[in-house]
Amino acid sequence: MNQYNNLTHRFVTYAIFVFCVALVSGCGTYGKIKPSREVTTAFTSFEVKKDHKYYMTGSDMYPDAIIAIDEKYTLTSKFWKEIEPEKLPDLVKQMNEKTPESLPKLYGYNILDNEGNDIGDWYSFVDETVIKVDGNKVTVYTPDIGGFEPGGDPDPATAGGGDGGGS
């Protein structure tokens, strides 16, 4: 009977190991954002990177964030709207006008993959997000603004952020 229990224990341990490896390998890898004065300057001086696509989230008038993703990657998040680069100056100006003094200043960040490679830029008053990279597909979660609507009062019913998810 002891030999049977030992064999069962090994099988269960092996099965759990295989399940965990399969689970982790199917999840992609996670990147991060890193503060960058250069990215901040690029956005505030309306510099457009020709090899990047631009996206925004939030209000069409007062975005919560703008990102620029290297064209080598496909953005899979469904809550970002692609924008034409020529709209960047107006959007950045409007973001700056409507960000109240009670919030952190707008700042630029490099979007990095799990190996530290630069795959894009992030511009927002929110300084954290989730970046998921799977091959050439990248998911960028929208910023969690905690119910704040630029130019308005915090409202839990309109809380933004969360899973930028997508397919």
Image (cartoon, grey):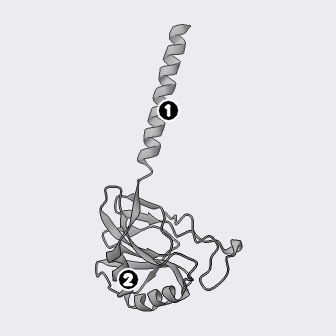
Point out the image quarter for the N terminus: top right
SS for callout 2: helix
Looking at the image, is mark 2 or mark 1 nearer the viewer? 2
Asked if 75 appears above or below 45 in the picture, the reply is: above
Q: Which mark is residue 151?
A: none
Image x and y of residue 157, in percent = 71, 73
**What amino acid type is highlighted by mark number 2?**
Phe
Q: Nearer the viewer, residue 71 or 162?
A: 162
Q: Nearer the viewer, residue 25 or 61?
A: 61
Q: Residue furthest front?
A: 101
**Quick check: 13 left or right of 51?**
right
Image x and y of residue 30, in percent = 41, 56
**What amino acid type is highlighted by mark number 1?**
Ile
Q: Nearer the viewer, residue 54 or 98?
A: 98
Image x and y of residue 20, in percent = 47, 39
Asked if 16 appears above or below 96 in the picture, the reply is: above
Asked if 93 appears above or below 73 in the picture, the reply is: below
Image x and y of residue 62, in percent = 54, 85
Mark 2, Cα crowd under 10 Å, few <14 / some 14-19 / many 20+, is many
Mark 1, Cα crowd under 10 Å, few <14 / some 14-19 / many 20+, is few
Image quadrant in which you'd find residue 58: bottom right
Q: Residue at x 53, y 70 (%)?
A: 143
Q: Which mark is residue 16?
A: 1
Residue ID for mark 2? 43
Q: Residue at x 57, y 83 (%)?
A: 100
Q: Nearer the viewer, residue 131 or 124?
A: 124
Answer with mark 2 or mark 1, whichever residue precedes in sequence. 1
Image quadrant in which you'd find residue 85: bottom left
Q: Residue at x 60, y 71 (%)?
A: 160
Asked if 7 appears above or below 162 in the picture, the reply is: above
SS for callout 1: helix
C-alpha distance separating marks 2 and 1: 48 Å
